[in-house]
Amino acid sequence: IRAQIFKHYKKEIPYSSEVIVTAFVEGEKLHRISAEIIVERDSQKNILIGEGGSMLKIVGKYARLDMEEFFQRKVFLEMFVKVIPDWRSKKNYLKKFGYE
């Protein structure tokens, strides 16, 4: 998901976002994956989603295709965009997201 964000967005969006996988359920024929994309501001959320969800749909489509190639099976991917104001300047979020 993060790779597709870098591919499809410019400027601050890729650097102000974080992707957290909130659920991963493996199945014989299908993997179900839920993820949150964290941004710092509502304006970033709007840019990330795009008009009528168009940009998020593109990111989701290509991320899902990459995952299906990797796992060699179908993937059901759901993504949610969440705003956490100024998360990059808060130590507790940086630690939670794996940054030391």
Image: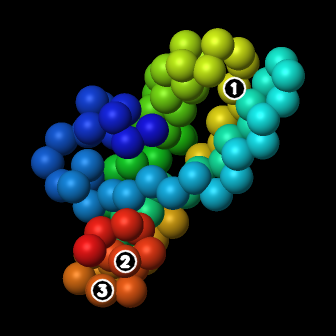
Labelled disc at residue 65: none
- Relative vertical location of residue 76 with respect to residue 24 in this rendering, above or below: above
- Relative vertical location of residue 14 with respect to residue 30 in this rendering, above or below: below
Q: Earlier in the sequence, mark 2 or mark 3?
A: 3
Q: Earlier in the sequence, mark 1 or mark 3?
A: 1
- Relative vertical location of residue 70 with respect to residue 20 in this rendering, above or below: above
Q: Considering the numbered disc 1 on the image, is that residue within a helix, a strand or a loop?
A: strand
* Amino acid identity at mark 2: Lys
Q: CA distance from mark 2 to mark 3?
A: 9 Å
Q: Position of residue 27 (x, y in %)?
A: 84, 30
Query: Circle 3 sits on which residue?
Result: 90
Bin the neighbour count of mark 1 within 10 Å (Cα to Cα): few under 14, some 14-19, many 20 and up. Answer: many
Q: Position of residue 42 (x, y in %)?
A: 39, 69
Q: Considering the numbered disc 2 on the image, is that residue within a helix, a strand or a loop?
A: helix
Query: Circle 1 sits on which residue?
Result: 75
| Drawn side of residue 41 relative to residue 52, left or right | left
Q: Considering the numbered disc 3 on the image, is that residue within a helix, a strand or a loop?
A: loop
Query: Circle 2 sits on which residue?
Result: 95
